[in-house]
Image (cartoon, grey):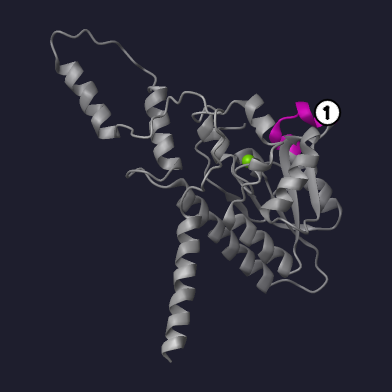
Amino acid sequence: MRAKLRFLGLVLLATEMAMAQAAGPPACPVEPGSRPVSLTPAKRPTAAQIQQTAEKGAADPTVIISAEPVGNFGVERYRLADYAECVGSGGCYWADLDAQTRRAEAALDRVIALKNPGEKLAVVLDIDETSMSGFCEMRREDYGFLITEMNHWMTTPQAAMPIPGTVRLFNKALSAGVDVFFITGRWDELREATVKNLEISGFKGWKGLALRVGRQKQMATVEYKSQERQKIVDAGYRIVLNMGDQWSDLNGDARGEVSVKLPNPFYYLP
Ligand SMILES: [Mg+2]
């Protein structure tokens, strides 16, 4: 009995550790010498402290203050870093991400329960900030989202950084006989690196992978992704679930029966 309880305790501990890991930022590989001088210090002033400083300055009759109609980018970057790294009281990106993938899993469970034999069902997934995370590179870039550096980083093994909840969703779909298609805004030149990093991240057995090729590179994302989803529908599938971190992953024609919008505070792709 005691051995059984100890075993149960270990299982619970392992589950808690796995959940804690899913709800916090991943450990980023350290690359000595490659990190630029950071504008985002590890010890950051809180929003309240920043406001106090501004209010104190504004109340000081010896200070001539300026109009500042746009929020200070550096301050926003502190808040973004806090959220992304789950520091302070401004929320935790990883917990929000995980909660949303659990909602997607629940939606998929409902679809699977009603699945008719012989029906071709598809799940569509975006890649960046949906299936794999660019968090470590974005943090290295001080959350500046530098597209050239980002594109280079995507070719490296460090870019194989899975989003745990999406791996769960992926495996759930495959076990139930639902095919999974990736549609990414990445260009086709990144196909080899993308295939490799998806595999390392635990995405094995997918049905399709679309990257922008030829004229698609100039298309609006909504148009390009709609076109790729239409190909899946034309192949006889029902797209039962589509998950992405941008509205442009979800909107447009041949949309998913259920669309799941993941949080992405880092960048916006129209
Ligand atoms: Mg994305």
Quarter of the image that includes the N terminus? bottom left
| Magenta segment boundaries in residue numbering | 214-224
Left or right: 177 with respect to 54?
Answer: right
Q: Is residue 179 above or below residue 229?
A: below
Q: Position of residue 224 (x, y in %)?
A: 76, 36
Q: Position of residue 207 (x, y in %)?
A: 81, 55
Taking the view exactly as shown, the residue that stands out farthest to the front is 32
Taking the view exactly as shown, the residue that stands out farthest to the bottom is 1
| Residue 253, visible in the rendered structure | no
Q: Position of residue 97 (x, y in %)?
A: 51, 51
Image point 45% across, 87% down: which residue?
Answer: 3
Along the line of sight, the residue nearer the viewer: 17 or 257: 17
Left or right: 11 with respect to 48?
Answer: right
Left or right: 17 with respect to 216?
Answer: left
Image point 77% across, 56% down: which residue?
Answer: 206
Q: Which residue is mark 1?
A: 215
Q: Residues within 10 Å of mark 1 (few under 14, many from 20)?
A: few
Q: Which of the 4 image quadrants contains residue 127?
A: top right
- Ligand 1 image-quadrant field: top right
Q: Is residue 111 above or below residue 101?
A: below
Taking the view exactly as shown, the residue that stands out farthest to the left is 61
Left or right: 219 with respect to 18?
Answer: right
Along the line of sight, the residue nearer the viewer: 233 or 148: 148
Number of marks drawn: 1
